[in-house]
Amino acid sequence: MDLKVPENFHMEASACHLDKPCYRVVLQVEDSLDRLMPYLNAVAKVIQYEPGDDPVMILKIDGYRVALRSREIAIGSVADRQEGTEAVVSVMGFLEDIWQKRDEITPNYKPRRRPPALELYKLLPGTNCGDCGEPACMAFAVKLSLDRVTAEACPYLKKDSKSMKKVGELLGF
C-alpha cells in the first residue's frame, strides 16, 4: 500500500465554529484503504467502523477527527491551509506506520458504533452541576457519544472508577 502524502488536496468550508472559519481536508488516495481498516480498528482510537462492501471508519489521529472510505480521507477541522497540510502529513504518517506494522497486529473486523448518549447518560450523576463545562448531564453525554469531550471532564466519573470503567467499555477503550 502506497500512502504517500499527496501534493494536491482540497479543503471545504465546515460549519464547526460560528465565531471563526474552519475547514475539512479531503484527499483521494490511489490504493484502497479497505485492507488497512481492520488493523486500525485493532490499535487506533476508532469511533465508528462499518466494514463491508463500502467500509467507513471514523477515528481520532493526533487530535484530528478522520473519516476513511475506500479511496478517500477526510480530516477536520483545521483552521487554514497550513494546518491542513500539517494534518495531512500527520495522518498519512500514522496510517503508513500502522500499515508497516500490520504483521505485528491482529486485525479486528468487528464493527464499532457510537454508544447511544442515553446509555452514557445513565452512568452520569444527573445533577446538571455544570462542572464539566456543559449545562446538563445529557448535553455532556451527547458530546461524549460524539467524541467531542472526554469522560475525564466529568468530576463525578473521575471519582467513580466503576462508572468510568463502564463508560470506557461503552466507548470501546
Image (cartoon, rainbow, N blue to C red):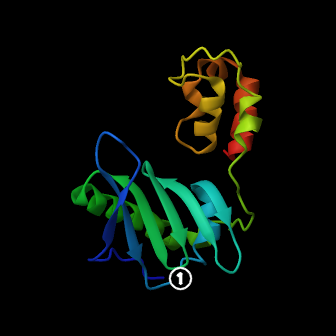
Q: At x 63% / y 17%, what residue is drawn?
A: 128
Q: Residue at x 54, y 16 (%)?
A: 131
Percent position of residue 111, x then y: 73, 62
Query: Which of these two is toward me, 131 or 5?
Result: 131
Residue 125 shown left or right of residue 12 in the figure: right
Residue at 60% of width from left, 31% of height from top?
A: 139
Q: Position of residue 25 (x, y in %)?
A: 36, 64
Which quarter of the picture shows residue 51?
A: bottom right
Task: Report the number of discs.
Answer: 1
Residue situated in front as seen by the camera: 6 or 28:
28
- Residue bearing mark 1: 32
Where residue 42 appears, as percent x and y from the top left, is 65, 60
Q: Residue placed at 64% from the left, 78% from the top?
A: 54
Q: Residue furthest left?
A: 82
Helix, strand or loop at mark 1: loop
Q: Residues within 10 Å of mark 1 (few under 14, many from 20)?
A: some
User: Which of these two is toward me, 166 or 124?
Assistant: 124
The C terminus lies in quadrant: top right
Residue 149 in the image: x percent, y percent?
Answer: 53, 36
In this image, 118 relative to 155: left or right? right
Residue 48 occupies which quadrant of the picture?
bottom right
Query: Does 136 sit above or below residue 105?
Result: above
Horizontal side, residue 173 vs residue 86: left or right:
right
Residue type pointed to by label 1: Ser
